[in-house]
Amino acid sequence: MVVFKVAHVETTPFDGQKPGTSGLRKKVKVFKQPHYLQNFVQSTFNALGADNVRGATLVVSGDGRYYSKDAIQIIIKMAAANGVRRIWVGQNGLLSTPAVSAVIRERTGADGSKANGAFILTASHNPGGPHEDFGIKYNMENGGPAPEGITDKIYYNTTTIKEYLIAEGLEDVDISTIGVTSFAGPEGQFDVDVFDSASDYVKLMRSIFDFQSIQNLLSSPKFTFCYDALHGVAGAYAKRIFVEELGAKESSLLNCVPKEDFGGGHPDPNLTYAKELVARMGLGKTDSGEEPPEFGAAADGDADRNMILGKRFFVTPSDSVAIIAANAVQAIPYFAGGLKGVARSMPTSAALDVVAKNLNLKFFEVPTGWKFFGNLMDAGMCSVCGEESFGTGSDHIREKDGIWAVLAWLSILAYKNKDSLGGDKLVSVEDIVRQHCIIKGIRPEVSKVVHADEFEYKDPVDGSVSKHQGIRYLFEDGSRLVFRLSGTGSEGATIRLYIEQYEQDPSKIGRDSQEALAPLVEVALALSKMQQYTGRTAPTVIT
């Protein structure tokens, strides 16, 4: 057994190591600076406290983006030096963010050990590669992102750090081969356990959904399916779940080989970046002439986001979570006993509010950031939740879950078509959305503003207050304008503008959104003076 020693390495703080809503994200060249990653990791260990680190079991994996393999080896050595007992690594360093949450909550090691937390190496939907983005975040024992109390401590520690601990004499671990590698250190044995990336997650999905029902749908010659992983980590799960478990054709999978640079693309599942899927689903600028599949979906880099498409039809994230919540009890066995409550982020449209009212469910509006949903779930107050940025999930884990959302939609389609598989026509995605729509009236012109505020959230579980979460304009007819400063990029800042209105006429639901929302867009630009302050005459991305 290899013996290692603990080295104390002097260091000085770096500016700007404040974790955002999803950890610390910077350009790769920033992370590759000497001591940069090490400072953040040690600051995290210090924030957790020595008593919680010594003897712990931690997960270390991510979406496979460039620099992940180097970072995993660094974190392994630092964990050993800080007294961690064992590290669990997904084979090849690959674990989706939802799978990490599942592993923390569900996996038991051969020696009976359970995970105490995880370092997740991802920058989510941001591009990857030597000149692109890298990220790291810490998840807690409940499987969810570290709360603000911990991230504030981490940031404070990054501003005062003087040294970090790292193991000397500990060789790089082969993370491509499943098995346990053991080392000996000052505090005893240290193990690195490389395990199958998909098994625990697949087992959990099988316990939530009726796989036989979905399999019946996918085996119907009338139902066609397409899934695009955008060369992210979702590819490590797609074949196992959709092909091997559910019987889909392998040809239905697009870009399902994980790549460090995501194939040179932008792994963000929206109509702008998922171009190949969008074209195949008949939503591209040019028609290929081929009949589109009945159902399509895409994932982001770490597989926690999703985009749902029907044949020539786009489902907005806000409508998606509302439709899942409305059909969950009937279509998904996990929810057969009922929903505890539902929640959405503040910028997400009010479609879920209407479902909650109709089903007499508890409803919560929270700031953007999955950790706010996690508090509600841990308190048994929320079952299904979603956010505006293509994030959907439930209380099965404490992260949003892209593949879960796809399986939820397939379950709803299977339920709606249980008596139609032998008929002439299936109930389509578009049919489900149109049937679901609970319409509120809206006049053709913009109505009066009845309320404007800066959104502030008081957590009903722990009483903590989150201020400055975005500016809202609420109109008399239920329309909304929301302005929010986003912190998920690796540099600079992004202003996100959300425009929402209800349509009374079902025949107009599918019309061009920019045309339909033009009056509200004009009001939003006038209120915000966007062009004056930013110098931009058009948005960078429209989703």
Image: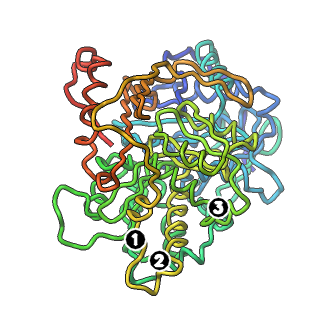
Name which of mark 2 and mark 3 comes first in the sequence: 2
Which circle's residue, 1 or 3, is located before the other in the chain? 1
Q: Residue at x 55, y 34 (%)?
A: 369
The residue that label 1 is drawn on is 225
Residue 28 lies, in percent from the top left, at: 41, 34
Tell whether 543 sits left or right of 56. Answer: left
What percent of the width, then of the height, locates residue 433? 42, 58
> Badge 2, how many Cα within 10 Å: few under 14, some, many 20+?
many
Q: Secondary structure at mark 2?
A: helix
CA–CA distance between discs 1 and 2?
A: 7 Å
Q: Is residue 150 above or below residue 359?
A: above
Q: Residue at x 48, y 18 (%)?
A: 453
**Residue matched to label 2:** 218
> Given the image, on which type of amino acid does mark 1 rest?
Phe
Q: Residues within 10 Å of mark 1 (few under 14, many from 20)?
A: many
- Of the numbered discs 1 and 2, the one sitting upstream in the chain is 2
Q: Is residue 443 left or right of residue 138?
A: left
Q: Are marks 1 and 2 in contact (CB under 8 Å)?
A: yes
Badge nearest the viewer, 1 or 3: 3
Residue 453 at least partly seen: yes
The kind of secondary structure element at disc 3 is helix
Res 485 seen here: no
Mark pair 1, 3: CA separation: 24 Å
* Residue under numbered circle 3: 329
Nearest to the eye among marks 2 and 3: give it.
3
